[in-house]
Amino acid sequence: MSRPIRILSSHLVNQIAAGEVVERPASVAKELIENSLDAACTRVEIDVERGGIKRLRVRDDGRGIPPDELVLALSRHATSKVADLSDLEAVSTLGFRGEALPSIASVSRLRLVSRSRDEPTALEVTVGSDGALEAPRPAAHPPGTSVDVQDLFYNTPARRKFLRSEKTELGHLEHVVRRIALARPEIAFQLRHNGRTLYDLPAAADAAGRRARLETLLGNAFAEQALTLDEEGVDLRLWGWVVRPAFSRSQADQQFFYVNGRMVRDKLVSHAVRQAFSDLLHHGRHPAYLLFLELPARMVDCNVHPSKHEVRFREGRQVHDFIFRVLQRRLSAGVLGESPSATGGAFGTGRGARAEDEPVARLGGVSGPTMRLPLAVGDGRGGYAERLQADLAFQRPPAGTGVDDAAERTSREDVEGHPLGYAIAQINGVYLLAQTPDGLIIVDIHAAHERIGYERLKTSWHSGAVIRQPLLVPVSVAVAPREADLIASRTDDLAALGLVIDRIDSGTLVVREVPALLRQADHEGLVRDLLSDLAVHGSSARLDEAVNAVLSTMACHGAVRANRRLTLDEMNGLLRDMERAERIDQCNHGRPTWIRVGFDELDRWFSRGR
């Protein structure tokens, strides 16, 4: 027997809407904290019990809710952030749909207390189990707003069954607080769980404060290995930090991307970032970054998903290419592209941290000239700069090598002009030691030479006409008609890259010529990968990636092998080549090619100056 069509009650409508907005306590925290930020607060306090299942209270010092609007704030689709279609087409606030508070109230016991900055007292309102609002009553509260959510999903047991353990729910909630706190360093945040303080982040007023927040939320290694970037173009600005590829991670757990201050998970953005890192990471490794994209609000649609995790760009290809180019340029420059004060990382620290999961190399077995120790044990590092010129003058090749001693004497200006300094020794047949005015450089000789050779091969490949290899037996590939249309529309572009593909009927392609370097490749697999990229992203780097894989193998075989003894001239020549090469911070397999150990770090090792 069919039921009659009827209008749902407001309470049931809100509970249905809660299915889109409220997934778990972390979802509640996100909505409430974003409301606090939209209210121009300077501090947010989050108190949690049992992972947020028992209780979750968010308190801010924002401008508060006027007394005559307090009840209205708990009504569905009631908001002060959007008034007409023009506001919706250029959203500048984190929240705007007017669904969060009534949806949360429909699946919990909610208490709302607020006081406007120009009001002498606060008002409190609570929501009954049937969704009815109790009459507002006076309450004690400083200027700002508190939203107290208790017993989440108490009246929807089917939803409550899907909640995980207290530890798991707290982990999700902590992640939400962390990613919001990373985007708003000027706001103070405090997170407490079962009375224990997990985060107490003061507002960051300067670079030192921002560094302290990064170290607290992402760790010292992120701060030390982060490369800064800030570029603008065509109404777009991309800024933030990206960790050197050599210090990638085994998980994609430190990837934060914000669009106009909103944390997003966008396929277009992810593809642009992956493409920028495609030639730099070892298989299975993941980049780490904290990036902010700013663009006019009219160029991005935030109203794609109720949780607002996804966005849609009006000029997607332009945004994709901008992100890709900016990241590619910055990663190509590497640490050597930083200002001298920031060479050890984005914040000018000394020694670089090791890559996750990589063993720490021990220094030992020094070969080459014996190093003198002109400073007393109790001395600080002030004397290092004065000794540098003498140290470099001491580094001469043995008599009879034919090298003019004067050529080995380098002025202080020359030293400062070369960020990798000058060689002093080769140890264990593998590593090169170089001295700079502010520390010690350790180079993996084979890895560095491999990257230099790889970049030269790529430059040669791209600077000349692509050599094509006709196939003795053309390769047929069966595809869908729309995929054949896609390839047919790109035949000229593909031919310029050395790949000649003909279409012989509605669903069959024939590969007739390929780049000479790829004559032994899986041609059918290459075409299918190309189609996948073109269908989803409108572009593909598969050909370049395939060619680069061959060039990388060639560079590896041509690099300096371990245990070959180099002269000082050869070592210094390698350092100069490294300073000129792009992407020199890591080898073709994603491992670091060099690290810096600052004199501050060396002093700590030996307790010098204490």
Image (cartoon, helix red, strand yellow):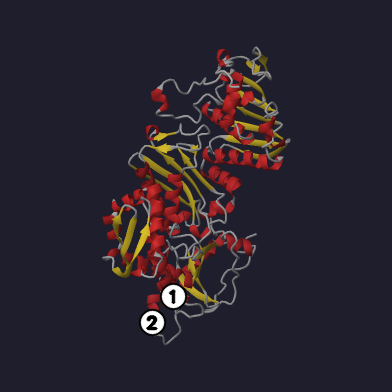
Q: Residue at x 40, y 29 (%)?
A: 90
Q: Number of numbered discs present? A: 2
Task: State the residue in front, 163 or 513.
Answer: 513
Q: Locate the C terminus by quadrant.
A: bottom right
Kindly report the distance in space between the C-alpha atoms of the residues bearing marks 2 and 1.
30 Å
Question: Could you say which quadrant of the image residue 202 lies in?
Answer: top right
Q: Amino acid at mark 1?
A: His
The residue beneath circle 1 is 557
The answer to whether mark 2 and mark 1 are in CB contact below 8 A is no
Helix, strand or loop status at disc 1: helix
Residue 88 image point, x, y percent: 42, 26
Q: Quadrant of the N terminus?
A: top right
Q: Is residue 323 in view from this perspective?
A: yes
Q: Nearer the viewer, residue 549 or 296?
A: 549
Report the disc number at residue 403.
Answer: 2
Would you say 177 lies left or right of 246 here? right
**Front residue of 171 and 7:** 7
Name the residue at 57% across, 21% down.
64
Q: Amino acid at mark 2?
A: Val
Residue 250's x, y, as percent? Answer: 57, 56
Residue 41 is left or right of residue 275, and the answer is right
Foreground residue among 533 and 27:
533
How far from the left and from the top, in percent, is residue 346? 49, 52
Give the crowd class for mark 1: few <14, some 14-19, many >=20 residues within 10 Å: few
Is residue 4 positioned above or below 386 on the image? above
Q: Which mark is residue 71?
A: none
* Relative vertical location of residue 538 with respect to residue 411 in this rendering, above or below: above
Which element type, helix, strand or loop, lies under badge 2?
A: loop
